[in-house]
Each structure stands twice: as structure tokens, then as C-alpha cells.
Amino acid sequence: MHPLLQQLGVADPAPGLICGERRGGSGALLESFDPATGKLLGRVQQATRAEYDEVVGRTEAAFAKWRAVPAPQRGEIVRQIGDELRRSKEPLGRLVTAECGKLLTEGLGEVQEMIDIADFAVGLSRQLYGLTMHSERPSHRMYEQWHPLGVVGIITAFNFPAAVWSWNAMLAAVCGDTMVWKPSPKTPLTAVAVQQIASRVLAKHGHPDAMSLLIGELADVGEPLLDDRRVPLVSATGSTAMGRIVGERVARRFGRTLLELGGNNAIVVLDDADLDLALRAIAFGAVGTAGQRCTTTRRVYLQKGIAAPLTARLVKAYATFKVGDPQAPGTLVGPLIDRAAVAGYERALAQIRAQGGEVLCGAKVLSGPGYESGCFVAPTLVRARHDLPQLQHEVFAPITYLIEVADVDEAIRCNNAVPQGLSSAIFTLNLRHAERFLSAAGSDCGIANVNIGTSGAEIGGAFGGEKETGGGREAGSDSWKAYMRRQTCTINFGATLPLAQGVQFEVGS
Ligand code: NAD
């Protein structure tokens, strides 16, 4: 058994079903591989369709009890989950790295993000505020209050195998919801390790079934969530193609969705930018997590005065990037998640070449010692025209387009000229240009930064994007409202029954 799994108390095979003391799964075995080495990390015994029904039933039953716990007490339980995550940060961070291939510093950072959102949720548990309004009727009081929704279905992507669950779970828990987690089949062991930590804390407090985990075939545990009226909210993170299916299916039963989908993010660099800052931000945004972040920088718009020198500096910098073992110090680029992702990278490059894009560096699958898994690719820079058709698509790999633009107006037009709307950034020292980018006529994305790259968001802000990114918001600010239902209450403490808008309706007694 892998030592990390042993350290985290994950059995072999790991349970694909965790709901309180109920552990198991009687479906087929799912194998999970380390994309850096190609070696088997562990196996999961998946859940069946019947087990899906059982778990959703138990989680629904747990809701009645969980919602009755005062929110600050729910916050205290979340605080203890955060503490357990602190204690397990090192092995859990290493497991994230082993299973999804991100650098060790990013794996540890992902667990830190879980701890941060737990802390945020603890404070939030005392701040689920509603407004009060002045009634137009005498001796009346109006206010709104927020109630929990019920069972939340959480579908997560492989590239943040732990943090995305926590963004949803920590908030949903203090809001009084119970939840069922369906993680990516590419990173199931991380999910088992995380769920076990949360379940231990919940069991100690008498709420074992409040958070549950289901790993199984899509037809058994993913798609049933979409049609299940016991699940009022489905929060789904992943590709736009997946989100389109989830959005349509859940809407058909008037369920709610929170969609966090694909990005196609741009950095604009103007002539007056601090180029040292821009260079670092582009490099981290483009090749961090091997280009497998929803916020990865895919397009870079360079104003013509700095286009040639910054391009030359980027090409030089790319030549120094160490691609390899994500656990090793000094590595900047780890593997792609699997060979299918490598095939996607190759297909995209063929398209780019056919459409007239000029490859400046990279553009190859790496082989030889250290690259035996077949999942390593060279970070790639492409010089392109703004109308290259391939620019419209998110390819989950380190391919970055450099595109020359005349001025800030053209840069904003180009930034917005894709179907996705997640993250965007401008590098400029000119206040007018910066504010123009942030204005209503500027970037159309959910995230717009100045002199900071597109990736690496903090949990305190609401995270999410517009257009085909799905419109959802998670994590900070008032994102918690997505996990609750709003109720408007009017109380008449007078002796008459006046009607709003002065309507008269006299009933003889
Ligand atoms: P994916 O769409 O292949 O899978 C995501 C999840 O959806 C997985 O758990 C998968 O099993 C599930 N799924 C797929 N089809 C489903 C269906 N019909 N019904 C129910 N569940 C279904 O995505 P991926 O390859 O794991 O992740 C990469 C994608 O996720 C990229 O597009 C990336 O931009 C996006 N992403 C977005 C955000 C964000 O916050 N906007 C964050 C992380 C990743």
C-alpha cells in the first residue's frame, strides 16, 4: 500500500461510499495512478446505483437534524474539521500532488486553501445576515431570513481535487445543508482521505451522515444527482461541456445549480507596464499546474511597443523551466493528468499550426528518463493573430498565445471576444487604462485584476465567471447565499388588516 494512504488511514481498496459509519461500495474497482510516474497509487471500490439511493436517503434524513443545530454550533464543528485538516496538511498535500501531479507547493497550498475556507466559514456562521425593511403599512414589520436548502450535490474536477469540495462543503455546512460529494474519477483517493477526516469530526458530534461521499460510474452516481428531487442544489465544477448537461437537466426539475466551468483567461500588457511583474505573472499563470487551472493564462495581449522585447524575454525564460517530478524542489512544471490530456495538447497544436499560429518554443511531448509516464509536455508559446479560431477554446495544457494589439481598446475587445468569462488581468501603470479595464465597458469576466495575473485567487472574494464559465460564485463575499433559501416575512402587530398599494377589499362581517 502507498505510504501516504497508510499515513492517512485510507484502506486498499478504499471505500467509494462514505456516509457515517457506512463505508464500502460494492461496484467495480477504480484504479488511480500517479501521472508523474505512471504507477498505481491505489484502488477504490465504487458505489452502485442502489447505494447512491441509500446514501442520498441517509443524507436527506440527516438534514432534519443538522439544520436544527444553531449556525454558530455548526461553525464550531467546521472549525474542528479545519483543525483536523491542519494536522493532516503535509500527507494530504503530498497525496494531492501524487494523484493530480501539481507541484508539492501547490498541493500543500490546496490544503491551506481548505483550512482558510474553514476559518472563513466559522466566522460566517455568526453572520448569515438578513435585511429588515420598512413596511408601507402601519404596525407592520418586514424582514428577510435565510434557511438551509437541503442536500447539496457537489461535483468536482480533477485539478482541485480537495479545495473545490471545501469551498462548497464548509459554506454549505454552516448554512445548515447536508451534502453528497461526487469527485472526479481521476482523483478519487484524495476525496476518500478528505471525506474520512470530515466524517470523523462529524461522527464525534452525532452528525455522521451530514457529509457523504460517492465514487462510482457516471450513470450510477453522477447523472442521478441531476434528476434527483431530493437534491435542491447541484454545485458542479468542471468543463463547460459538463456544465451544459448539468445546467439543463437540473433546470428541467427547477433545481438550482452553481456552475464553475471552463476558463480562457487573458493578460493584457500595455506599453507602460512594469515588465518584470508582467513576466512573472504570465509565467506562473501560463505554466503553473502545467496549464491545468481554470484560471490559467491562455492568451496574452501585448501592446505593440513592448511586444517584441517581452516576447523575447518570455521565450528565454521558458527555456529555463524545469519540467519533471512535481515533488522535486526546483521543478516548475509537472505532468498533465493523463495521456488523454497529452493527446488533447497534440491535437490543439496541430490545429494551431494548420490555422497559421507560429510556435515560438515547446510544442513537444517529452520522453526519456523521468518522463516514462508519457504525461509530460513542453510549455509552449505561440505567436498568433487575434482571430486564430483555436483561441476560442480552452485546452487544458500549457499552451499560451501571444497576440499583438494596438491599444487598450483593442486589448479589451480581444479579452472579451471568447465564449468563456472567468479571469482577466491588465498590466499597466496608467490609472486611466487600469480603470478602463475594470469599468462596465472593460473586462466582461468574473475576475479582473490589475498588475496581478489571472490565477491564484484568495478565498475572501467571490470566485467564478460569466458566460460559458457558468455564472456561479463560490468561496468568499456573499457566495453563501447560493446554499440557502431566502424567506421574506411580514408581521402585522396592529389591529387592522391594511392591504399593500392601498387596495381596498371590505368583507361584510
Ligand atoms: P470534467 O468536466 O471532465 O469533469 C468534472 C466533473 O464532472 C467530474 O467529477 C466528472 O465525473 C463530472 N461529470 C462529467 N459529466 C457529468 C455528467 N453528465 N453528470 C454529472 N457529472 C458529470 O472536468 P475535469 O477535466 O475534471 O476538469 C477540468 C475542467 O474543469 C476545465 O474545463 C476547468 O476549467 C474546469 N474547472 C473550473 C473551475 C472553476 O471554478 N471555474 C475550477 C476547476 C476546474
Image (tube, grey):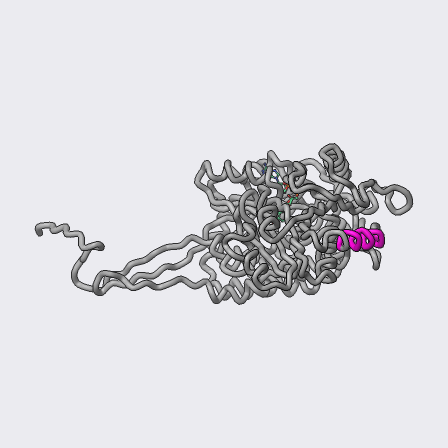
Where residue 98 appears, as percent x and y from the top left, is 77, 51
**Front-lying residue, 15 or 463:** 463
Q: In terms of image quarters, where does ligand 1 lie? A: top right
**Front-lying residue, 341 or 327:** 341
Q: Residue furthest top?
A: 354
Up-down relation of residue 499 to residue 357 (above or below): below
Please tell me which residue is depicted at 52% across the width and 62% down the height of the picture. 74
Q: Is residue 2 magenta?
A: no
Where residue 11 appears, as percent x and y from the top left, is 73, 49
Where residue 117 appears, as percent x and y from the top left, is 59, 61
Please tell me which residue is depicted at 52% across the width and 57% down the height of the picture. 439
**Front-lying residue, 445 or 131:** 445
Please tell me which residue is depicted at 71% across the width and 45% down the height of the picture. 401
Q: Is residue 311 magenta?
A: yes
Where residue 385 appears, as percent x and y from the top left, is 69, 41
Residue 504 visible to an observer of this rendering: yes
Please tell me which residue is depicted at 80% across the width and 41% down the height of the picture. 363
Q: Residue furthest left?
A: 508
Up-down relation of residue 115 to residue 472 (above or below): below
Residue 340 visible to an observer of this rendering: no
Count of numbered marks: 0
The magenta region covers 310-322
Overall secondary structure of the magenta section: helix
Q: Quadrant of residue 261?
A: top right
